Amino acid sequence: MKIINLSETDSVVNRYLSEIRDVNYQQNRLLFRNNITRIGEMMAYEISKTLSYEDREVTTPLGTARVRLPENDIVLSTIFRAGLPLHTGFLNVFDHAENAFVSAYRKYTDDTHTEVGIHVEYLATPNLDGKTLIIADPMLATGGSIEMGYRAFLTKGLPKRVDIACVIATPEGIEHVRRTMPDDITTVWCAAIDERLDEHKYIVPGLGDAGDLCFGEKL
C-alpha cells in the first residue's frame, strides 16, 4: 500500500490546512468548508497525475488537435456527512466521474465513550467492476468508517484501483487500512499525518469534528 503525505512537499495545501486547524478560523463554517473543498481539488490534481492516459483527437474550428486524456473510469465516493465538501472538490476536478455515497458513522458502544463502533445505513453507487474508486473522507482516525464504507461498496462490484483521500490521517488509521484493504491496489492520500488518537478516538492535534465544523452540531 502506498502512502502519499502532501505535507511533505511545500505547497499551498499547507496554508489551507493551517487555516482549518485554527480555532478562530473555524468559527466561519463557509470558510472551513471552502478550504476542505480546495484541499480536495489539489489532491484530485495530484491523483490525476497517476492515472493511465491515452492519445485522442479533438476537432477544433481550424483543424485537429491531439490530446492525452485519462482512460480510467472513475467513481468518486464519500461518507456522509463530513465527506461532502471534500467530495465536491474532487468532483470539481473529475467532473465526468460517476459518484457513490454511503452513510457510515462512528457510534460509541460504551458509557465512557472510549469504544467506537461503525454504523452503516445508506448506500448508493454505480457498478464498480474494473473502475478506479476514490473514497473521500476528511478524517482517517480509526479507519473503521473507511473499511465499512469500502465493504459496502464492494457489494456493487470490484474496483481495480482504490484511492483513499483524507485531509488528516493517523498512524492507527493507516495501519487499520493496511490490514483490512487490498494492499496491492490501495493508495492513501492525505494532507497531513498527525500524532495519535486520544481516548475518545479523536485525532490529536487534529482539528476537531469535521462534520460539525462543516454543518453544525448533531444530536
Image (cartoon, rainbow, N blue to C red):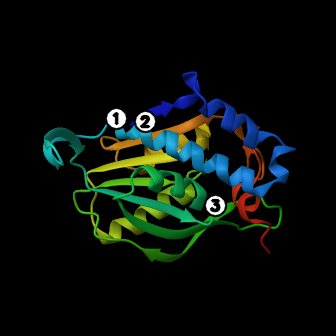
Label 1 to label 3: alpha-carbon separation? 26 Å
* Residue under pointer 1: 49
Q: Which residue is mark 3?
A: 82
Let me know if residue 8 appears in the view. Answer: yes
Observer able to see residue 114: no
Q: Residue at x 80, y 75 (%)?
A: 219
Circle number at residue 219: none
Tell me the mark number nearer the camera, choosing from 1 and 3.
1
Are dots 2 and 1 in contact, CB under 8 Å? Answer: yes
Alpha carbon distance from label 3 to label 2: 22 Å
For numbered disc 1, what is the local secondary structure? loop
Q: Earlier in the sequence, mark 1 or mark 3?
A: 1
* Residue 139 located left or right of residue 200: left
Closer to the eye: label 3 or 2: 2
Q: Residues within 10 Å of mark 1 (few under 14, many from 20)?
A: few
Q: Position of residue 76 (x, y in %)?
A: 41, 58
Q: Residue 6, percent across and down?
A: 53, 30
Quarter containing the N terminus: top left
Is the residue 104 above or below the residue 68 in the image?
below
Q: Is residue 214 above or below residue 103?
A: above
Residue at 22% x, 57% y: name it: 130
Residue type, mark 3 in image: Ala
Residue 46 is labelled as 2
Say which amino acid is labelled 2.
Glu
Q: Nearer the viewer, residue 90 or 144?
A: 90
Q: What is the spatial separation of the Cα atoms under label 2 and label 1, in whole angstroms?
A: 6 Å
When asked about the image quadrant of residue 206, the answer is top right
| Residue 47 picture location, percent across and down | 39, 39
Q: Residues within 10 Å of mark 3 (few under 14, many from 20)?
A: many
| Residue 37 left/right relative to 91 | right
The residue positioned farthest toward the front in the image shown: 62
